[in-house]
Image (tube, rainbow, N blue to C red):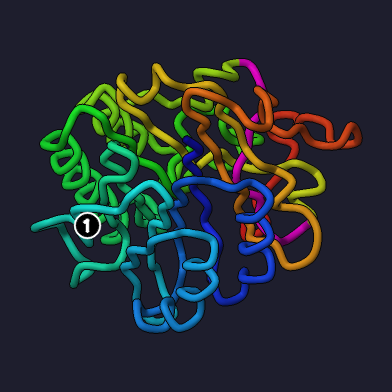
Amino acid sequence: MRIATWNVNSVKQRVPRLLPWLDERKPDVVCLQETKLTDDAFGELLDEELEQRGYAVAAHGESAWNGVAILSRVGLDDVVRGIPDGPGFPHQEARAITATTGGIRTTCVYVPNGRSPGSDHYAYKLEWLAALRDMVAAGPDAAVVLGDMNIAPTDEDVFDPEAYVDQTHVTPPERAALTALQEAKGLRDVVRERWPEERVFTYWDYRAGMFHKDLGMRIDLILASEPVAERRAAAWVDRQARKGSGPSDHAPVILDLDEAPDGDIGPMIPPPSAKPARRGSHKLPQAP
């Protein structure tokens, strides 16, 4: 079974990329984030195309912002939209959806950004992660939590740690919240486990040629419980999907269980011209 996650950064804009990617990679379960469509609009846009490809769909969206969806060709049961009794800002946002797919309790998440350390939105992010942890901990043993975590687990997961000083995504409280989520269910970071020494990113800002310079972050994760992780045949980042015309600023992340149709190909590496960044040699595009 092939499980994938992809922050598409507006599914409406990404249809010309999404449908060919589904045909090429043939994932059995796909978790999408930042769909930016209401459920009705999502269905009007994609239901026919997805049905032709054999996918059942569960969406949880809102107009213009946020939005998550699960597409599955291996069953889609017991759907829960949101985090029961979870926090909002001020109301609950469309940031989580859970369903049983192929016998695995699958939770697709778009974790709040946090905006800036110490802000109200940063506090909301930590509260939201704690609520997610409690929900996942109460679920079945065969589980996977995947999506845009908006957290880089370690300094190795950003192109230059010094560029992120005083920024979100890398602060100790965020990383501690991510660790607590993993420990609550024994969730394993399957990509990093498989490629512990590789340079692996999943997100590159559109600005300043960040993708072509390979100045990115690894913030899109697949976290799998032991019964799922032990079935791993391959775990990788489909960097090819970030290339070309009209891409998302995120690349898909793929977990192959039991067998690997494309082989155990690893993270698709950057071009030889993209050298690893020297610490302290870059600033983020939005930084002064």
Principal secondary structure, stretch drawn in magenta: loop
> Residue drawn 33% across and 36% down?
144
Q: Is residue 206 magenta?
A: yes
Where does residue 113 sit, x and y in percent of width and height? 40, 56
Q: Residue 227 is drawn in which quadrant?
A: top left
Where does residue 188 sit, x and y in percent of width and height? 37, 23
Q: Residue 205 is drawn in which quadrant?
A: bottom right
Q: Across the whole image, how many numbered discs are drawn on residues? A: 1
Q: Is residue 233 magenta?
A: no
194 vs 213: above or below: above
Q: Is residue 40 left or right of residue 8?
A: left
Disc 1 marks a residue whose amino acid type is Val
Q: Is residue 178 left or right of residue 90?
A: right
> Residue drawn 19% across and 71% down?
90
Where is the C terminus found, in terms of image quarters?
Answer: bottom right
Where does residue 73 sit, x and y in percent of width and height? 43, 51
73 vs 45: above or below: above
Q: Is residue 197 left or right of residue 275?
A: left
Q: Is residue 232 left or right of residue 172?
A: right
> Residue drawn 75% across and 29% down?
278
> Residue drawn 56% across and 76% down?
12
Where does residue 61 sit, x and y in percent of width and height? 34, 72
Q: Which residue is mark 1?
A: 79
Question: Relative to the observer, which residue lies in front, 277 or 218?
Answer: 218
137 vs 5: above or below: above
Question: Relative to the observer, which residue lies in front, 246 or 226?
Answer: 226
Single out the residue that lies furthest toward the right: 273
Characterize the local packing of mark 1: few (<14), some (14-19) or many (20 or more) Cα atoms within 10 angstroms: some
Question: Relative to the observer, which residue lies in front, 22 or 176?
Answer: 22
Mark 1: secondary structure: strand
Residues drawn in magenta? 197-208
